[in-house]
């Protein structure tokens, strides 16, 4: 099946017409789908932010996206009703991720709509966003598409990075929400860290048992080392 499937990064106006046709059919027959967002879909096509999925040269799916600093946000992704429950959505996403990796994109973000699609996104490895204090849906998810440093519940007390989900003045008497063991070579991490966060949250770096720095996430960024890429914290190096 995989050999018969391909994604088209530059679909034609004819491909768009095919998508419109089956979206209209879905809307008329089941009162569901994304035809209600047709103006957004058409605008994304004109902005070259729409890709399609083809099976035996038939357009059976599409995806539109927005571009962030270090991530891509999937705005809409759909496979035609006639081709669902065959693993096409999984393959579509995997092929899209392969393209993004070649473009040095680090993560994917999305709003899970409809709510019933949450199970699919979780199966694809997506993680729920933490509450960041913004007007953000509880159905916001993300997925790093590069190998990243995992969090740990039992950090190395000599070398670690700790992140609280509160501001510094609130972090005095509570423990951190996330911890990472830190291994540095010439100031660079063995694997980078990608974590959704509020830029005002408290971040602490401990090196050789000594607290090197503790401050808001945004103040860890400087001209030599930026870690603030809203809505993500991206840490690939730490220097005193």
Image (cartoon, helix red, strand yellow):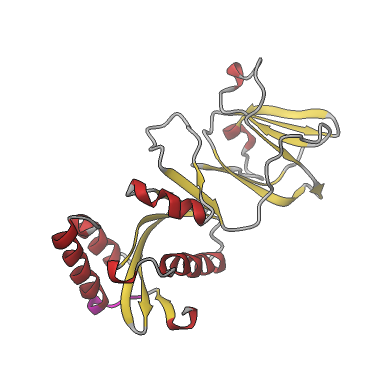
Q: Where 117 falls versus 155 (above or below)? A: below
Closest to the observer: 84 or 228? 84
Compared to 51, does 1 lie above or below? below
* The residue positioned farthest toward the right in the image shown: 208
Q: Residue at x 40, y 73 (%)?
A: 9
The one of 19 and 217 positioned closer to us in this rendering: 19
* Quadrant position of the C terminus in the picture: top right
**Residue 82, position in %: x, y?**
29, 71
The segment highlighted magenta reads 10-14
38 left or right of 192?
Answer: left
Rendering coords of residue 129 (x, y %): 49, 40
Nearer to me, 161 or 25: 25
Looking at the image, can residue 115 be seen?
yes
Question: Is 26 above or below relative to 228?
Answer: below
At x 43%, y 83%, the residue is: 4
Residue lying farthest front? 85
Residue 68 appears in the rendering: no
Question: What is the quadrant of residue 76 in the picture?
Answer: bottom left
């Amino acid at each position: 099946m995989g050999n018969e499937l391909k994604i088209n990064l530059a679909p034609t106006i004819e491909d768009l017409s095919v998508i419109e046709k089956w979206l209209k059919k879905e809307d008329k027959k089941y009162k569901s789908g994304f035809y209600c967002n047709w103006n957004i879909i058409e605008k994304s096509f004109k902005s070259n932010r729409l890709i399609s999925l083809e099976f035996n040269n038939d357009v059976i799916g599409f995806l539109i996206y927005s571009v962030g600093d270090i991530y891509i946000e999937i705005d809409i992704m759909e496979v035609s009703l006639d081709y669902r429950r065959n693993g096409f959505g999984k393959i579509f996403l995997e092929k899209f991720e392969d393209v993004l990796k070649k473009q040095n994109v680090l993560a994917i973000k999305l709003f899970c709509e409809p709510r019933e699609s949450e199970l699919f996104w979780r199966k694809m490895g997506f993680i729920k966003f933490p509450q960041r204090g913004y007007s953000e849906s509880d159905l916001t998810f993300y997925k790093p598409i590069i190998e990243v440093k995992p969090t740990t519940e039992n950090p190395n007390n000599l070398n670690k990075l700790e992140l609280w989900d509160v501001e510094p003045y609130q972090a005095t008497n509570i423990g951190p929400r996330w911890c990472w063991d830190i291994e540095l070579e010439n100031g660079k991490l063995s694997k980078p860290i990608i974590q959704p966060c509020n830029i005002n949250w408290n971040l602490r770096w401990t090196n050789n048992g000594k607290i090197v720095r503790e401050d808001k996430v945004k103040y860890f960024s400087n001209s030599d080392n930026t870690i603030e890429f809203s809505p993500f914290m991206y840490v690939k190096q730490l220097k005193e």
